[in-house]
Amino acid sequence: MEKMEKNNQLNTKENMMQLVFFASALVSVLAVIAICLFLLMRGIPAISEIGLKNFLFNQKWAPTNTPPTFGILSMIVGSLYVTAGAIIIGVPIGIMCAIFLAEFCPISIYKIVKPSVNLLAGIPSIIYGFFGMEIVVPYVREMIGGNGYSILSASIILGIMILPTIITISESSIRAVPKSYMEASLGIGATREESIFKVVVPAAKSGILTSIILGIGRAVGETMAVVMVAGGAVMPLEKIALLKPIRTLTANIVTEMSYASGLHTESLIATGVVLFVFIIILNTALSLIKTKTKN
Amino acid sequence: MYNTKGDNEHMKARKKIILIAMSLMLILSAVGCSNKQTTEFNADKEITVIARDAASGTRGAFHELMKIKVKEKETETDNLAVGALEFDGTDKVITAVEKDKYAVGYISIGSLSDRVKPASINGFFPTEENVKNGDYVVSRPYLLLTNGIENDLVKDFLSFTESVQGQEIVRKMHYIGAVESPKLYEASNISGTIKVAGSTSVAPLMEKIQEAYKDLNPNVTFEMQANGSSQGIKAAIEGTYDIGMSSRNLKDDEKSQLNEHTLAIDGIAVIINKINPKTDLSSENITKIYTGEITKWSEVK
Amino acid sequence: MENLINIKSNIKKRKIQSMFLKALVWISGIITVGILAYILLFVLLRGIPNINMEFLFGTYNSETLSAFSSIVATLLMIIISLVVAVPIGVFCAVYLTEYAKRGNKAVKIIRLAVDTLAGIPSIIYGLFGMIFFVAVLGFKTSLLSGICTISIMILPIIISSSEEAIRTVPDLYREGSLGLGASRLRTVFKIVLPTAVPGILSGVILAIGRIVGETAALIFTSGTNVLESPTLNLFASQRTLAIHMYMLASEGLPHSKDMAFATGAILIIIVFLVNLATTKLANKIGRM
């Protein structure tokens, strides 16, 4: 009898804890729902007041004029350019470095390079921004031209920032390619380099693609570093150039939010909604790749 | 494996490490050398125009005073040049001007340092004296206004703003004090509520002063509405608020109805790189530079 | 004969190509390490000479620009947000690994949510925190709002590292424990979680790194207010070290640039220590 009671007690405890575990697991789901809900709740009214077409496709952003205009096309394009630049700079170096780590690197050097990559991932974005402002911007100005605050500077900084993401994930996916691929390729007379570039790397392509998409996500969403090097000018589309300043979606939010009021604030939140949509698209792409590789 | 080939591999690895270290040093020194600024000034280079972000109070004041922002009856348009840099902090402006020979920017006078130099405007440098007597044109008063009906509490608070303690806060916030010889304020255990309305530019300074006042007079509470200078002036005339805040000079018809207390003077310095030879700018030139009519230093007359 | 020459020249070409690829790969490795070395040297060389006791432990004013209150705020933020997020994260991982049935719909949704959280940029977290914690829940711009925001941000890091750690616990352990008559719950708390501790810890350390370096999510939630001396008041707006650096880099006070470097040096040293700890732990796990 006593034992039964004890068992019962145990069972309720077990059930209760199971509930606690499940509730904890639900927190993430609730958080995602809350983030979507509240962003949309504050962003959608602003967009409908400004007009979706006017908000997305107007290049003029003049929140302090009377009457104000809130068009973010220039910033959408700016975010795309800067991200593309980061990919052009970061992806080749990142993938090459991943190949280096996975295939070429002697252990003694691996012990230096691998922690370096990890450290690169841990450096706060504000420090990247500071580095960009103090070193990259003057360098671009003196060596290449323009006033330094430019798409190019932002691309360089973002390219560096996405390196660790690309290197880490690409490296592990290259390592996951079965050794027999390499052996077979060497067996038919290919050199080591040829085998790696023509057999091993293509076999790891879904992992590498994942790393690139994660890199894009990081570049699109990066704020503090971009604010410090991109110059913050809202450029008309026809004047956008590699050496000219630019404003991204993230920069728009962070520079103006602190003093904004009224519709201006709401329109900045709406800018966040647009950014969020970009991120959702990237996430969907990621999960598509995941399911595809599983099959 | 390590026993047979170990030494050899070790040597190889060491060689490689040395190689890497050397190439690293090469990169570092290359980048380091290239970063030095040359001192020649090419006046045909484009001016790097630097402004603050749209939400900044300094920008609002500067663009209005320099007619970069044009007001017509119903509309207000900021004609800032296309491609002008917009930064959300004073130090970013200073850093950019410090490093870019061809840059021009504007900052609050209190933030001037020897990393850059201020340009004189119409021949006058932004010294405290020139600002106070109005020779330096890029400045504006911060006014506290009442319609003459001042109760004891309002009087006490106004005397605090003009006291040593009040003006100390003004200076701390990088404004120029407007009181010649401030007296020391002594708290008199007063209580009540003061209603303040007006300029959004004055509001941050006002908030600090209110905090300090409340420390000395814990029974006083404030109600503050930051809704713009014109609203503040209107509220003070009508008496709906005890004190109106304005960051612009009063028009004549307003002047006759109000008591003015100048809380502080907000001066804005136009800064240029230390090697820039164009040290004097006319206000007309500044307008042209900032609206993109002039794009090269050689065009600045 | 001609064919043979062709093949020979082809081999030569291919050898040169291979050398070229090899060089490219090496250069990429060198560039990566070089950039890191450059950033570290740049910040440390200009920052460390400016660090002094006054800066580390003094009261803040426009002369000292002391980071003391920011250091305390950062510590508070780390401790409290870990206290909030670690149990939730670990329990979530326990649910996913020990309780949920495979292919369960709920699991799919939870996984999707965790992945989504991991991909959301910090500025969006900042906006959400500003809307939800600051305004809707009425926490105002305060350390508390910042902590709540950060707790959600680090959740996916803790969940995925815990999940991975729990999965590596051999089934034999569980079977043994269950076979001895221990309940499932007891098995989780006495066998599975203790074995997974190093893995969970490495997630915690990663999270600390993220908290220390975060700026964009905190500007609108915990605010940029600087206190003269530290306070434990969670309802006060306080700035963390990273925000202290950002503000110093935009404020324009006389030595704010030097002090921004000093703050940057402290940040880098912290990040370095955090990384060292993670590597040590990872090695330990590898040896087990």
Image: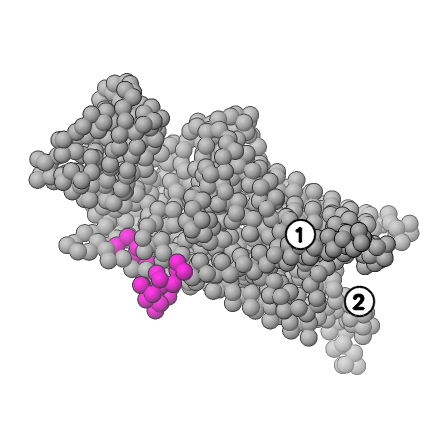
**Image quarter in which the C terminus of chain A is found:** bottom right
A26 or A68, which lies in front? A26
**Residue at image location 35% in from the left, 46% down from the top:** A259
Residue A2 is left or right of residue A19, and the answer is right
Q: Residue furthest front?
A: A1
In the foreground, C161 or C39: C161
Toward the viewer: B208 or A256? B208
Q: Residue at x 69, y 63 (%)?
A: C100
Q: Whole-Å distance between the Cαs marked 1 and 2?
A: 36 Å
Label ID, residue C231? none
Q: Quadrant of the N terminus of chain A?
A: bottom right
Q: Residues within 10 Å of mark 1 (few under 14, many from 20)?
A: many
Helix, strand or loop at mark 1 = helix
- Tell me where the magenta segment starts and ends, as one range: A41-65
- The residue that appears at 18% across and 40% down in the rendered structure is B240
Nearer to us: label 1 or label 2: 1
Describe residue C83's horizontal placement relative to residue C223 as left or right: right
Numbered badge on residue A179? 2
Q: Which mark is residue C90?
A: 1
Rendered location of residue C174, percent (x, y): 81, 56
Which residue: 33% across, 48% down?
A: B55
Do we see residue C48 in this rendering?
Answer: yes
Q: Dot 2, how many residues are within 10 Å of its Cα: few (below 14), some (14-19), or many (20+)?
A: few
